[in-house]
Amino acid sequence: MRTRGVLIAAVTACLLLGWWLAHPPATLPRPDPTAIAGCPLPPRVQRGDPPLQTDAPRDLSLPAIGDGALSPLAGFSVEARVLGREDYRMGREATFSPTDLALGWGRMADEAVLAQLDISQGGRWYRYRWRDQPPIPADEIIRSSANMHIVPANDAVAAALGRVEAGQRLRIDGWLVRIDADDGRWHWRSSLSRDDSGDGACELVYACALTPL
């Protein structure tokens, strides 16, 4: 009787295995490790391309930070070399963006080009100088680099931002935004062009993901 019971159990197990192989369970989607509640990722830039700016969905809303309401203006994704970083603790802007990153792409990520430029940051500005003549046309420098005010979407992005160093390459995915204070007396708005320079030309980026490359 014991041998018969073992035989029946073995046959039953084989039948169950055959049914499972014929009807495999549905594969569950793997969660995106970069997805952030309240900060969906925009379309991502392709490797080697200039920054990608896309339309912001009309129904997209971003969480407020302190007394500042965030309005998404455009999706933004950039892969670039870090030309420099500057941290800020003073001023209203520091409440939202503790760090500016000067970023370069295209030929402004090439070591041979950067070796002929003196790059500095301060006062929420990014500056570059050359000695006799620019290593590439000045308008290309403008189109291929920018100072970006980074607004971390959460503590993980803030921690990643704190580890960024000049010379490394990274990708930032998020949204260009406008920030309006509750009292209506102050606002901060991102540039929506890569061709501008001077006052108001910096990007104000609400960063959903910051990925070293």
Image (spheres, rainbow, N blue to C red):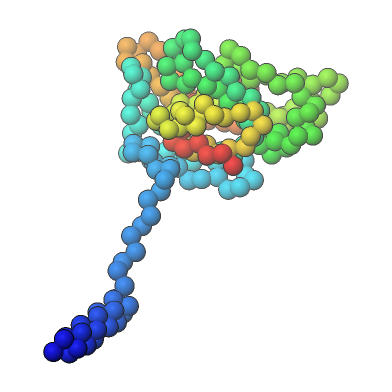
- Front-most of 57 and 118? 118
- Front-most of 15 and 149? 15
Number of dots carrying numbers:
0
Residue furthest to the right? 132
- Where residue 189 sits in the image (x, y, percent)? 47, 22
**Can residue 201 be seen here?**
no
200 to the left or right of 39: right
Vertical arrangement, residue 134 with respect to residue 37, above or below:
above
Q: Residue at x 52, y 21 (%)?
A: 99
- Where residue 21 sits in the image (x, y, percent)? 32, 78
Locate the N terminus and report the quarter of the image it occupies. Answer: bottom left
Q: Residue at x 63, y 31 (%)?
A: 82
Q: Quadrant of residue 146?
A: top right
- Where residue 123 sits in the image (x, y, percent)? 58, 12
95 to the left or right of 137: left
Locate the C terminus and report the quarter of the image it occupies. Answer: top right
- Where residue 158 sits in the image (x, y, percent)? 45, 28
**Can residue 138 be seen here?**
yes
Q: Quadrant of residue 177?
A: top left
Q: Residue at x 35, y 31 (%)?
A: 62
Q: Quadrant of residue 12?
A: bottom left
- Front-most of 7 and 21? 7
Vertical arrangement, residue 196 with respect to residue 213, above or below:
above
Q: Residue at x 29, y 79 (%)?
A: 17
Residue furthest to the front? 2
